Image (tube, grey):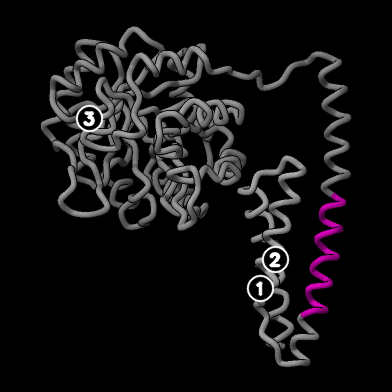
Amino acid sequence: MENKKEMRQWLTDFGLDHPLVIGGPCSAETEEQVLKIAHELKDTDVTVYRAGIWKPRTRPGMFEGVGAIGLGWLKKVKEETGLLTATEVANKDHVKLALDNDVDILWIGARSTVSPFIMQEIADALKGTDKIVLVKNPVNPDLALWLGGVERLHTANIKNLGLIHRGFSTYEKTKYRNIPEWQIAIEVKNKFPDLPMICDPSHIGGKRDMIFDISQAALDLNFDGLMIETHTDPDNAWSDAAQQVTPIRLVEIMNDLKVRKVTTDQEAYQNALSNLRAQIDVIDQTLLDTLGKRMKTAVEIGTIKKDNNVAVLQNKRWNEILGKMILEGQERNLSEEFILRVFKAVHQESINQQEKIINS
């Protein structure tokens, strides 16, 4: 992708001395509600006011947004407060209406990013626009879909691009509404280092009391900003009530967050860091060697199973290993979530290796 540095220019042009903050309600409900929230945010570090006009819902019969009438309310927000405005677009009709009403930032939601057809339709409708366009990660942890969506927009000559990390759905029960899978966001950042990355802690956590910790984690990973759902009466919000915070709470969160330096030239820091990184390199090499030995043993087990016509998957044995590793992990201050991720991945690779033997 060429001209990547141009993509960051829109963020630089804001001239902020802090990460970008996008705040506002999950859904625009009434004109009064939209303007009340905006006026409570206008003298804070919030730069962009967000509000969902069209709300893609999982099942019919749920509140699906006020529709185009809400775009007029966003116009009033800009006129009365000076805040930039943002809303989600999910098809070419949304795009046209948002552009006609001078919405400053358009974001493409997780349900849209999963479909190359939808992404192409939106890219065609936005072709050549100088508006800022942000792309949320797809619902499922599919890196190619996320990258593909960005590439379609770039091919349509849309230079003011950015990303929103809002977590990924999972069938497993976790403390998150959508698991962060930070490594996927980091991989995207590594591929497109000049593409601004915004974190959406509201959708990752799903609960307002998780927003601070997720926001801090994002800033620790050098994210460029935050999109936090904000409502004057969050408990009675028409959508996603549990994950919205009041404007007062949003200000508290912003004040308490720590913005880390990217680096420092202090000699003591650089020496200590180099020493610890060297240790990490040695440990990583040991990990690879150990994993290689484990897979070699798994292959030998596969050979024995093949010779005796025994099934690859042995659930009882697997559950015993998992239970033991969780307990031993706790003794080493390793979370159950981490142990499950690591050992499920190791187990899956062992199965893959054994299946090759069984089927050879």
SS at circle 1: helix
For the point 47% across and 12% down, which residue is it?
15
- Of residue 210 and residue 99, the one placed in the foreground of this image is 210
Give the CA separation, mark 2 to mark 3.
Answer: 46 Å
Residue 117, image x and y in percent? 32, 57
Q: Inspect the image, locate mark 3, and give the three-letter code of the amino acid beneath it.
A: Asn
Question: Badge 2 is on which residue?
Answer: 320
> Does the stretch in magenta take in 32?
no
Residue 226, image x and y in percent? 45, 27
SS at circle 3: helix
Q: Main secondary structure of the magenta part?
A: helix
Q: Could you tell whether 225 is left or right of 83 in the image?
A: right
Question: Badge 3 is on which residue?
Answer: 236
Q: Which mark is residue 316?
A: 1
Residue 55, image x and y in percent? 23, 42
Q: Inspect the image, locate mark 1, and give the three-letter code of the amino acid beneath it.
A: Lys
Q: Residues within 10 Å of mark 3 (few under 14, many from 20)?
A: few
Rendered view: 293 above or below 85: below
Q: Tell me, yes or no, whether the two marked residues, 2 and 1, touch with CB atoms within 8 Å.
A: yes
For the point 17% across and 43% down, which residue is it?
63
Q: Earlier in the sequence, mark 2 or mark 3?
A: 3
